[in-house]
Image (cartoon, rainbow, N blue to C red):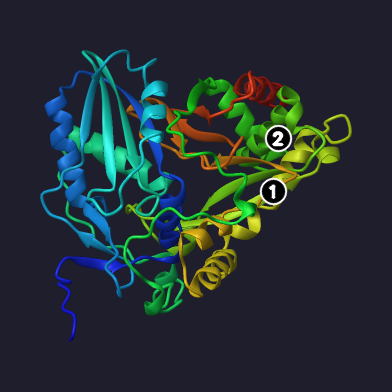
Amino acid sequence: MQKHVDLTDAVRHLGSFEHLFWLVNEHRPVHFTLAAEIVGKTTPADWRDALDRVQARHPLLSVRVDRMPGWLPRFRRVEEAPIPLKVVAGDPRSAWPAEVGEELATPFDPSSAPLARAVLIHAPDAATLIFAAHHAIADGFALAHVIRDTLEALAGAEFDPLPVTPSVDEILGLSGPVARLEAAGGRQQPAAVSAKTSPYRPRDGARPKVQGVRLPQPLTARLRERAREERTTVHGALLAALAVACAHVSPDWRGIPLRLVSPVNVRRTLGVGEDCGVFLGAATSVLHPGVVDLSATGFWDLARHAKSSVLPAQGREGAEAVTSALRQAMRGGPDIATAAEFMLVAPEQSRRASFRQPVRSADAHRDVGSGRALPFEGEQTISAATVNGSLCLTHTSYTPPRGLLETMDDMLAEAAAA
């Protein structure tokens, strides 16, 4: 008997990164948030209307993931499924870390649309908007564009709907879905994977701790100038500061290799605009104890070394290499266990930290903070965004070493002034 499936609202198959994030989310949550403080008088009704118009602009803000038996997973558009908006009364400047932690501890069900939600911390003269998204439909740059569009909609802008953006695989000419048809099944249950997955955190419903700092405009400008003089970037400086700060504030991070995992924005490389979607590469900087010791390695030498491992991933060849490797790993029959083990790039005798690249956000923002659900035990994530010329850093962790963000702040100030 031939099966009939209504594909009227089908958008497209998931690309390799989207497929990976979809599967890993079944093992441990990997969604993320972006928060922006906005100055000015608004009402919750204004924000509701703005979110509705932005959702109509970006197709992937209205989808769920279809996973019917015998069919490869695909995005399916769902009408009349508005982005949930939770309104909280409080101080927009101080209440956002707790709300971000709560959002990161609350997983998404990818079979239900939409795969995004928002929290509004509202006060008479200011507000903080927290946007959370499943990683299968968006990356950090996508959410920065979504928040910018929300602010423009709040100011009365009208938008034309954007077309559905193809996946990275399609843009790179890697034809066909990432998995074979026979490997696709119905909804999988969270799997018991091999002992190699011991770095994963328990599924205990705990809420991560979130903290943010803001570098003043003059310091941010000087840091950028100094990085340019030292033939590196602010990204390289942040990687160096994170590595040294980890070793400085926690004995557990000393004497073993440190892996700094950086997502790489490939939108410009692929000619992708500002659409909602996942357009990422990945790079890992492995720093051994002798390299992180600033008595033997200068700060800017370390920044150049850390940044050098990111450069190859920023070009088209790097994007093709990462995407092809992921497709190959997933092709043999992707399941939750396969995806979970693919994510384990760090061996047991190392520590993992991740760094989310800086994004430049709209001038209407005053501060930005972001976070990512952390699947690995002991993982530390530093997120960065440049807003009105000031660099905003956010630290997210279930087990944050005391003083990590403050130590990074001090090191960046010292490096910029040296």
Please state the horizontal and vertical placement of residue 300, each as a whole percent of the image. 76, 36
- Residue 352: image quadrant is top right
- Front-lying residue, 356 or 158: 356
- Front-lying residue, 299 or 22: 22
- Relative to residue 93, is residue 368 depicted above or below? below
The residue furthest right is 296
User: Quadrant location of the N terminus?
Assistant: bottom left
**Could you tell me which residue is drawn at 70 percent across and 35 percent down?**
243
Circle 2 SS class: helix
Q: Which residue is mark 2?
A: 243
- Residue 193: image quadrant is bottom right
Kindly report the distance in space between the C-alpha atoms of the residues bearing marks 1 and 2: 10 Å
Q: Are marks 1 and 2 in contact (CB under 8 Å)?
A: yes
In the displayed structure image, the side of residue 271 where residue 383 appears, left or right? right
User: Quadrant location of the C terminus?
Assistant: top right
In the displayed structure image, the side of residue 311 where residue 272 appears, left or right? left
User: How crowded is the residue under tag 2: few (<14 C-alpha within 10 Å), some, or many (20+)?
Assistant: many
- Front-lying residue, 234 or 9: 9
Q: Which residue is mark 1?
A: 285
Please state the horizontal and vertical placement of residue 218, each as a whole percent of the image. 56, 21
Circle 1 SS class: strand
Q: Is residue 391 visible?
A: yes
In the displayed structure image, the side of residue 305 where residue 60 appears, left or right? left
Numbered tag placed on residue 258 in the rendering: none
- Front-lying residue, 113 or 221: 113
- Residue type at tag 2: Ala
**Could you tell me which residue is drawn at 32 percent across and 28 percent down?**
364
- Residue 296: image quadrant is top right
Q: Which comes sooner in the sequence, label 1 or label 2?
A: 2
**Could you tell me which residue is drawn at 71 percent across and 47 percent down?**
348
- Residue type at tag 1: Ser
